[in-house]
Image (cartoon, rainbow, N blue to C red):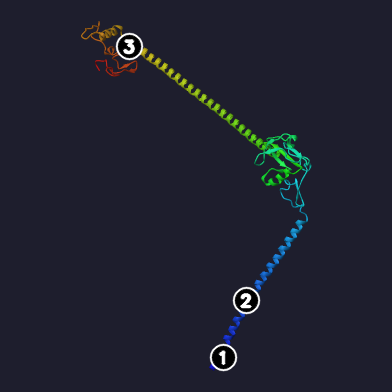
Amino acid sequence: MGKKRKGSDDELKKKKKDTKKKKKKDGKKNKKDKKKKKKDSKKAKKVDSTSSSSDSSGSTSIDPKKKRHKDDKELEAVAVDNGAQRVLHAKDLPPPEEGILRFEFTTEESGPLGLRFSAGYPPLILEVHAETFAGRKGVPSNHEVHAINGLALVPMNRDVVMNSLKARPVTLDVRPQGWKPREKIMQIERKRQLEEAEKQVRIQEEEKRRVQVAQEAAEQAQREAHERAERQEERRRAREEREREAREARQQQKFREEEFERILAGDPEPLRAAAQGLMEADYGTDVKVEGRRGLPLRLLTRRKEVAWLWAGEVQELIGGGVFDPGDSWS
């Protein structure tokens, strides 16, 4: 029994080892297959791209005139024929713009043109020598070189332009200093007109504002004048009212005083005269009144200096009122 069990255990171990080996072999095989597939796909892509590029190059090479550089218009004055440069005639160039002067020098006019240029771009014609091709054609000095054979005087055209200047025929376009293309002039003019229109709008707005400010100031001045006139009228009315009240008060006072005087005059004249004499007499003087032993007390108080009430008005007490430094009794 023991031998049989040992034999079965060994068989199981062998089987496990065999399955592990098979799994490893299968994994390696799958990895190889994947790598092979990737290589094949990359090769297929390369083939497609090369074929497409060859097709596109073939299509473009068929008609090179269809695809031109954006600067071909500037370089159209120079044609290339089998690698050699060929200069076009002036009649093949577009007509010069307004303000540009064009001078053509033919193949018979070989040699120096008789011009002295300044440095920089565009060069300025500093001097035109007499009895030279340029002098006889009337090339003006103090003008800028605009183009040579239709090529603008810019740094990128330097080599081509210098070679063209030495060759014949050659076409020289010059312009006055400060010259601008017609489109630029029109753009500047439009900008100027726009600024002028904006300026006119601002001027109109400022005039409206000034008119409004002047109108508001006039209205304010008118209101102030009206208010001032109203205040003056109120003061005048108040003054007239006070004057009227003062006149009425004086009339009433005068009426009361007259009435009071009339009451005072109701006593007999001899008694009033005796009271007056008694009050004005010196101390100790004997004043006699005919037919009477004395005088009524009211006759002695009917003087304004000693009366408490006079014509209905309360009088100041004797010794009262404002302090008087010259008064010996104060």
What's the residue type where badge 3 is placed?
Leu
| Circles 2, 3 touching at the beta carbon (< 8 Å) | no
User: Upstream in the sequence, badge 3 or badge 1?
Assistant: 1
| Numbered badge on residue 264 | 3
> In the visual, does 70 lie left or right of 31?
right
Percent across and percent down for residue 28 are 62, 76
Location of the N terminus by quadrant is: bottom right
Q: Quadrant of residue 258?
A: top left
> In the visual, does 193 lie left or right of 309?
right
Label 2, label 1: how many angstroms apart (C-alpha)?
32 Å
Location of the C terminus by quadrant is: top left
Percent across and percent down for residue 288 are 23, 6
Percent across and percent down for residue 197 are 65, 35
Residue 170 in view in this figure: yes
User: Upstream in the sequence, badge 2 or badge 3?
Assistant: 2
For label 2, the residue is: 28
40 over 249 or under it: above or below: below
242 over 212 or under it: above or below: above
Which residue: 53% across, 93% down?
Answer: 2
| Numbered badge on residue 299 | none
Residue 180 in view in this figure: no
40 or 295, which lies in front? 40
| Numbered badge on residue 7 | 1
Dot 1: element: helix
Label 3, label 1: how many angstroms apart (C-alpha)?
178 Å
What's the residue type where badge 2 is placed?
Lys
Which residue: 34% across, 11% down?
Answer: 261
Q: Nearer the viewer, mark 2 or mark 1?
A: 2
Which residue: 74% across, 58% down?
Answer: 57
What's the residue type where badge 1 is placed?
Gly
Q: Residue at the far bottom: name it.
A: 1
